[in-house]
Amino acid sequence: MRSYLVAAIQMTSLPKLQKNLAEAEELIDLAVRRGAELVCLPENFSFMGDEQEKSSQASEIAQQTEKFLKTTAQRFQVTLLAGGFPVPTENNKVYNTALLIDPSGNELARYQKVHLFDVNLPDGNTYHESFTVMAGQQLPSVYQSEELGNLGLSVCYDVRFPELYRHLSHQGAQVLFVPAAFTAYTGKDHWEVLLKARAIENTCYVVAPAQTGNHYGRRYTHGHAMIIDPWGVILDDAGDKPGVAIAEIQPTRLEQVRVQMPCLKHRVF
Ligand SMILES: O=C(O)CNC(=O)[C@H](CS)NC(=O)CCC(=O)C(=O)O
């Protein structure tokens, strides 16, 4: 592992596939111009619409999104982490899928979100992800990159389940991805705290691309795509507008924190 710049992209994705892909490409371009070698896209980056609409267009979304990721990674010669997008299953549902793609367009890792967001919020919004999404059955994997370090995958609501990240850090993760579309209502109180906790307790970098603003109807997301270091310090925060958070991943900093705070070595359970 060496030092490099990572980017966490922030978007206001809409129920419009081609428009979102064009927007993602512009932001990837911006991140690469600023020197990022690993660029991370948020959950639902290619399509953000109600669950029924997403489900009915899932084949098209999956096909176009995977093609976009491969060609864009090659074109910009960059590693891409794509937050969740729907990939159809046999039984008319989808997996909320995250993908890691190398600069040659090859798939390095794939993860199907295991925790589904079935929650009624006090603001009147109801979420029933499991109506259209199948829960993944496997814990996410850690992709071991010689250059970029050990990269652990997760998606959004997973961030509330610390055991998943314990699993990742136990498998050697050094960088944890949390691509998200956090609701505005929960995000204002929980987003930053949860991300910092995952960074601190696992002494890992956390890279959290995000959705922001109004997507359709009453659907608002929190924004604040961010990158957090293994001590829990926010290195960059994209605020509440579309854009990019960028920071340096430094192996020496990771080592230093793990020496100063050796909690991974003190695990009992
Ligand atoms: O909102 C959308 O349209 C898109 N969001 C998603 O697809 C997913 C599943 S519904 N959102 C979350 O997991 C939010 C979690 C969250 O906000 C929390 O844990 O508080």
Image: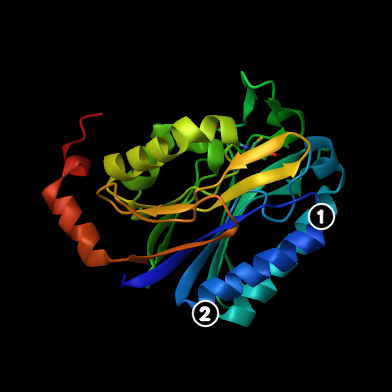
Please give the name of the residue rendered at 52% of the width and 66% of the height, measured from the top-left corner.
Answer: 39
* Residue 186 image offset from top left, x and y in percent: 53, 30
Query: Three-letter amino acid code at disc 2?
Result: Arg
* Residue 140 image offset from top left, x and y in percent: 50, 46
Dot 1 corresponds to which residue?
16
Circles 1, 2 touching at the beta carbon (< 8 Å) = no
Query: Three-letter amino acid code at disc 1?
Result: Lys
* Residue 27 image offset from top left, x and y in percent: 61, 68
Dot 2 corresponds to which residue?
33
SS state under label 2: helix
Residue 168's place in the image compared with 60, above or below, is above
Please give the name of the residue rendered at 61% of the width and 47% of the height, measured from the top-left corner.
Answer: 212
Indicate which disc residue 168 carries: none
Q: Nearer the viewer, residue 116 or 245?
A: 245
Q: Is residue 201 left or right of residue 138?
A: left
Crowdedness near tag 1: few (<14), some (14–19) or many (≥20) residues, C-alpha within 10 Å: few
Q: Is residue 76 left or right of residue 205?
A: right
Crowdedness near tag 2: few (<14), some (14–19) or many (≥20) residues, C-alpha within 10 Å: few
Any part of residue 115 in sight = no
Farthest residue in the left direction?
260
Residues at marks 1 and 2, CA–CA distance in whole angstroms = 26 Å
